[in-house]
Amino acid sequence: MTQRLTIRRPDDWHVHLRDGAMLAAVAGFTARQFGRAIVMPNLTPPVTTAAAAARYRTRILAALDEGTAFTPLMTCYLTDRSDAADIAAGHADGVFTACKLYPAHATTNSAYGVTDILALTKVLETLQRIGMPLLIHGEVTDRSIDIFDREAVFVERVLTPLTREFPALKIVLEHITTAEAAAFVAEADHPIGATITPQHLMINRNAIFDGGLRPHAYCLPVLKREAHRLAVRRAAVSGSPRFFLGTDSAPHVVGAKESGCGCAGIFNAPFALEAYARVFDEEGALDRFEGFAAEHGARFYGLPLNEGIVTLERDPAVVPDRIGEGDTAVVPFLAGESTGWRFVG
Ligand code: NCD
Ligand code: ZN
């Protein structure tokens, strides 16, 4: 049995680093494991301009210990009023790596999101022309659609026509949770990829209701039934270059989760690689772990692979019940459990 695993330094293609005290509390966990990360723009207010993204990038770097080798890759939050010229200029200047599309009201801080995606013609044409990826939170927001069906319906009603209208638009379907999304991404005749989170690989929707309501297992897109988890797992370990690591680590202070109306989001950054390693190990696919974690995403984005390496060791250490205190106290994913691995560095 493999006791030590060394791979090329990986990247996290979807993370929420927040701002202010929470940023200071969490950024180090991501920078410790990953060379780069695609940083989500859903702050309040959201990051909608290149100038705001450049300032946010500076705050992220200031939150890290001096000398930390970590590159935050910034994203632009699309709204109905997004300015294609500012986006293109931000991309040309190396500020923006990608644009993020939140359907309005789909998730945390998405009230400014897009009400009609196909109406964003000018922006989408620009992204297609300059080869800038569009990252999509793929859920319809129609409240008459069952919450467990919103991703599959999005694939059919929005993603399918979008890929037809913009055949060369690079798309990343973020945090996929269903067999339908996995199949679409695997098979589409289109430049498309998908990120996959540890939680959608490790737990199904029963975890939200396990002996009582479990707010720390609540994220969006919501966990699905077991058959979907298995389909997403097969996609992750398949070796297909279209699937890559994106934690969707989304910290919320404990009180905002343990509430009458708890926030969506799972904080998995402190033990992210360990969690993914467990999945690949269980699937007998440790030989494909490096591709998923450190190669497929960079190639999709057209970026060089990282130079360094990281090592994990088998270890029965248990994830702590809580990380941080006061305004930044967060319950991590897998609290009280062991991943079976330890990140050595
Ligand atoms: C994210 C957050 O808290 O910002 N929450 C989540 O459940 N994933 C938003 C998001 O990515 O949908
Ligand atoms: Zn997210």
Image: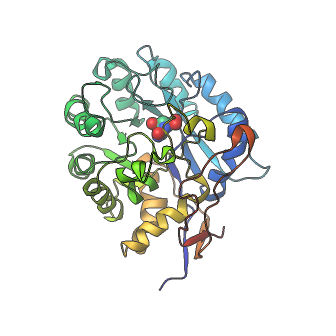
Residue 299 visible to an observer of this rendering: no
Please tell me which residue is depicted at 37% across the width and 76% down the height of the picture. Answer: 284
- Residue 244: percent from left, percent from top: 41, 54
Instruction: Look at the picture and state if 89 lies above or below 182.
Output: above
170 to the left or right of 3: left
User: Can you name the residue that lies furthest to the bottom here?
Assistant: 1
- Residue 162: percent from left, percent from top: 25, 30
User: Can you name the residue that lies furthest to the front here?
Assistant: 211
Task: Between residue 26 and residue 32, name the one nearer to us.
Answer: 26
Please tell me which residue is depicted at 54% across the width and 42% down the height of the picture. Answer: 250
Colour convention of the picture:
rainbow
Instruction: Look at the picture and state if 49 lies above or below 245.
Output: above
- Quadrant placement of the C terminus: bottom right
- Residue 95: percent from left, percent from top: 58, 33
Please tell me which residue is depicted at 73% across the width and 53% down the height of the picture. Answer: 68
Q: How many marks?
A: 0
Residue 133 occupies which quadrant of the picture? Answer: top left
Please tell me which residue is depicted at 27% across the width and 48% down the height of the picture. Answer: 185
Task: Between residue 235 and residue 120, name the one nearer to us.
Answer: 235
240 to the left or right of 277: left
Residue 138 occupies which quadrant of the picture? Answer: top left
Residue 33 visible to an observer of this rendering: yes
User: Can you name the residue that lies furthest to the top here?
Assistant: 81
- Residue 21: percent from left, percent from top: 73, 36
Task: Between residue 307 and residue 265, name the one nearer to us.
Answer: 265
